[in-house]
């Protein structure tokens, strides 16, 4: 998922496989911000859903993120949500709607989306694809065909992502020359 799915068709893609109730995914936000600052539109960052069974509100949180995408505010919503996972733990799914309201999104539409399940297939498809490519925990990154598992340790992952992104961008420049 990205805020503009077709705007960066030529840009290399970094898939961020996440559970939106995961403390490790919250810690990954600084790396994601740094990557967005460094690469901007030259690297497409896509949120991919991999809700873990141990986080009982993660599946609903993934659906809420999809609704935020529909409303054009995917990353602001995701960052706010990951920054407040303790509140999600305590308040449950009603917090997802309240957070949307706080961010100025259409909270009634969030509530309806969570009830009618309009985004379930997207979340299910992401989770199935993640399992098929070997994602077992979160965060996991995939760039240039390489899977980088941050579930056990995130140390050195941003540097490795930058190495791969730089190589992909250099290859892209060579092909265009």
Image (cartoon, rainbow, N blue to C red):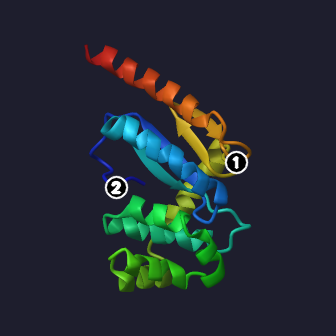
Residue at (52, 51) in percent of width and height: 29
Q: Classify mark 1: residues with Cα within 10 Å, few (<14), some (14-19) or many (20+).
A: some
Residue at (61, 36) in percent of width and height: 157
Secondary element under disc 2, as helix, strand or loop, is loop
Could you tell me residue 80's position as x and y percent?
47, 66
Q: Is residue 33 above or below residue 155?
A: below
Residue at (47, 40) in percent of width and height: 14
Q: Is residue 160 visible?
A: yes
Q: Classify mark 2: residues with Cα within 10 Å, few (<14), some (14-19) or many (20+).
A: some
Secondary element under disc 1, as helix, strand or loop, is loop
Residue at (71, 66) in percent of width and height: 53
Q: Which residue in the structure is indicated by mark 2? A: 3
Could you tell me residue 75's position as x and y percent?
41, 58
Q: Which residue in the structure is indicated by mark 1? A: 151
Q: Nearer the viewer, residue 9 or 34?
A: 34
Q: Nearer the viewer, residue 166 or 7?
A: 166
Toward which corner of the image does residue 113 lie, by quadrant? bottom left
């Amino acid at each position: 998922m990205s805020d503009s799915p077709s705007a960066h068709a030529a840009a290399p893609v970094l898939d961020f496989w996440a559970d939106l109730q995961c403390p490790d995914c919250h810690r990954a936000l600084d790396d994601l911000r740094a990557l967005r600052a460094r690469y901007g539109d030259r690297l497409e960052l896509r949120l991919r859903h991999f809700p873990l069974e141990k986080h009982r509100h993660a599946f609903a949180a993934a659906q809420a993120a999809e609704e935020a995408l529909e409303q054009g505010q995917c990353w602001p919503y995701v960052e706010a949500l990951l920054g407040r996972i303790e509140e999600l733990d305590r308040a449950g799914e009603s917090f997802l709607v309240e957070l949307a309201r706080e961010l100025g999104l259409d909270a009634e539409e969030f509530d309806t989306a969570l009830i009618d399940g309009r985004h379930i297939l997207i979340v299910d498809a992401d989770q199935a694809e993640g399992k098929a490519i070997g994602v077992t925990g979160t965060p996991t990154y995939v760039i240039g065909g390489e899977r980088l598992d941050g579930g056990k340790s995130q140390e050195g992952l941003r540097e490795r992502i930058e190495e791969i992104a730089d190589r992909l961008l250099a290859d892209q420049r060579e092909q265009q020359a």
